[in-house]
Amino acid sequence: MKRKRVSASVEKTSGPATHSEDYAGEAVTRHAGLEGDINPAIGRMDNRLLADYVAQRTKQFSDHLSLVELEDMYVPESAILDTSEWGQERLATSLPDFLIKIAQRDGRSTDLALASIKPGSPHTLVVTGAALRAAELTRLLRKFQSKDATVAKLFAKHIKLNDAAAFVKKTRINIGVGTPSRMIDLITEGALRLENLERVIIDTSFLDRKKRNIFDMKETQQPLLQFLNLDELKPRYTATGSPVKLIFY
């Protein structure tokens, strides 16, 4: 069945935000300061359209793969949580409120400031394309940090892998924020554990200065797809009882 195309039109907003049509024919909302540019079309997609979006982006840099290998890389529609009803733009500053709503909706870890007693076992991972963006999101999510729960930076810039692994192995983490490459390394090292993971937030609406998101660049898309297809993670999408949900922000 042919899937419908998401409309590119957006309502005008008050304040410093402006709109243009220079991102793949879709409207871009521009914000001053650290917010950068936002592609609001991502937030309007339901789980079916998002699965199709990921499949199309996966093909972009995977022409060396066979059809079977390519289809194995796709994210299943059932793994994606539909959050298209969220009425606000997906700004960095709105992420804490978004997480609260999601936690209340799925009924798990409704107190986001709680962490497992097992070190390195977050209930939420936020995956973004760059260390600077990860640092900013970490700062905003520190409102969920407590003496027994750390919102942890999980990226490579200025932090050696051995030091990061040692920190994660001894720290109770409720939310981890970072890049897919560093998360893969920490999982491989046995530092970052996924048995208590409930949700993965993929920072998709944010655009860099060249109007690209995490799926538009080979150097960020391929590590992200590798992370999403990890043997430690992919079977959890369809697990009974406590599946891991993918959430596109």
Image (spheres, rainbow, N blue to C red):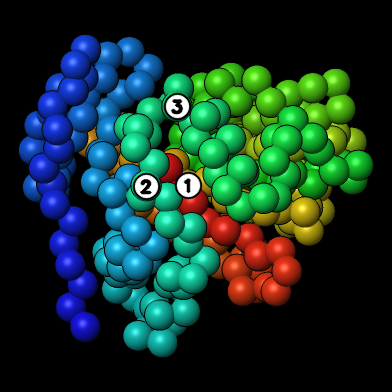
The quadrant where residue 49 appears: bottom left
Instruction: Kindly identify the amino acid type of the residue bearing the numbered disc 2.
Output: Glu
Q: Which residue is mark 2?
A: 85
Give the residue at x 28% y 33%. Answer: 38
Instruction: Tell me if I can see residue 166 in this picture.
Output: no
Instruction: Give the secondary structure at mark 3.
Output: helix
Instruction: Kindly identify the amino acid type of the residue bearing the numbered disc 3.
Output: Ser
User: How many residues crowd around disc 2 within 10 Å: few (fewer than 14), some, or many (20 or more)?
Assistant: few
Task: Give the image location of residue 218, x and y in percent.
Answer: 36, 53
In this picture, residue 110 sits left or right of residue 46: right
Q: Which residue is mark 1?
A: 202
**In contact (CB < 8 Å): disc 2 and disc 3:** no
The quadrant where residue 126 appears: top right
Instruction: Give the secondary structure at mark 1.
Output: strand
* Residue depth check, mark 1 versus mark 3: number of the one nearer the observer: 3
Disc number at residue 122?
none
